[in-house]
Amino acid sequence: MFITITGGASSGKSRLGEDYALRLGGPLLYIATMEPFGEEGKSRVARHRTLRQGKGFETLEIYRNLGEALDEPSFQNTTTVLLECMLNLLANETFSPANPGGDPVSYIKADVLALRNAVPNLIVITGEIFSDGEDYPPETARYIRDLGKVNRFLAAQSDLVVKAVAGIPLMLKGNLSKFSKQSAQPPNST
């Protein structure tokens, strides 16, 4: 099962992704892509760790070169991978001084396909940043266009695409009856 979850900031994407991962079963691996810069970044990472506490996730922090996750011991025998989040991964690949150049969209697509082929269940959290109508510097505008390319790719590859709006999952693609034999209802995201 390949699931993409999208939505705006603080829309409930993370909680929904965790709920789906728990329903799919484990061993569970959480791939964290947010490189914690400054106090705000450290606070967000701590909050997400607290939310996952006691749920059975092993955490792997990968900020760039997502395909390296396949070589990690924690990846072996994993059933469900929750990758959070594509916005951070693309920003890291695009703006990092360590970026070797080239096309980060191509790298990310290849790495996502490798993950998808390596585990029974992959859940990817991404985001919506396309509707504010602002004019941005060229490098930021390129990042937004690239995120659109990645999101379209994720949606095309996914069995299920869900948009989180105020904690409510809206099904954009797929059918939850394939997702769970127990219920056709989305998991509780409150």
Image: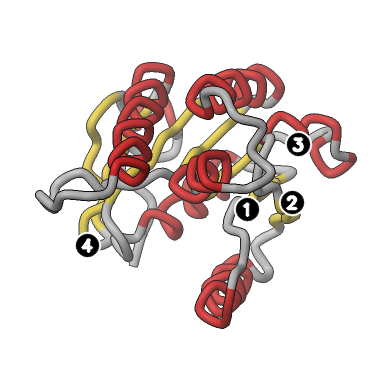
Disc nearest the viewer among 1 and 4: 1
Q: Earlier in the sequence, mark 3 or mark 1?
A: 1
Q: What element carries label 4?
A: loop
Q: In this orientation, which residue lies closer to the viewer: 12 or 64? A: 64
Alpha carbon distance from label 3 to label 1: 11 Å
Q: In which quarter of the image is residue 141?
A: top left
The residue positioned 51% from the left and 40% from the top of the image is: 94
| Marks 1,2: beta carbons within 8 A | yes
Q: In this view, does 89 lie to the left or right of 11?
A: right
Alpha carbon distance from label 3 to label 4: 31 Å
The residue indicated by pointer 3 is: 69
Q: How crowded is mark 1: few (under 14 residues within 10 Å), some or many (20 or more)?
A: many
The residue positioned 57% from the left and 40% from the top of the image is: 93
Residue 36 at what x, y percent from top left?
Answer: 61, 67
The residue indicated by pointer 1 is: 32
The residue indicated by pointer 2 is: 60
Q: Which of marks 1 and 2 is nearer the N terminus?
A: 1
Label 1 is placed on what type of residue?
A: Ala
Disc nearest the viewer among 2 and 4: 2
The residue indicated by pointer 4 is: 166
Q: In which quarter of the image is residue 51?
A: bottom right
Alpha carbon distance from label 1 to label 4: 23 Å
Q: Quadrant of residue 73?
A: top right
* Res 151 label: none
Q: Earlier in the sequence, mark 3 or mark 4?
A: 3
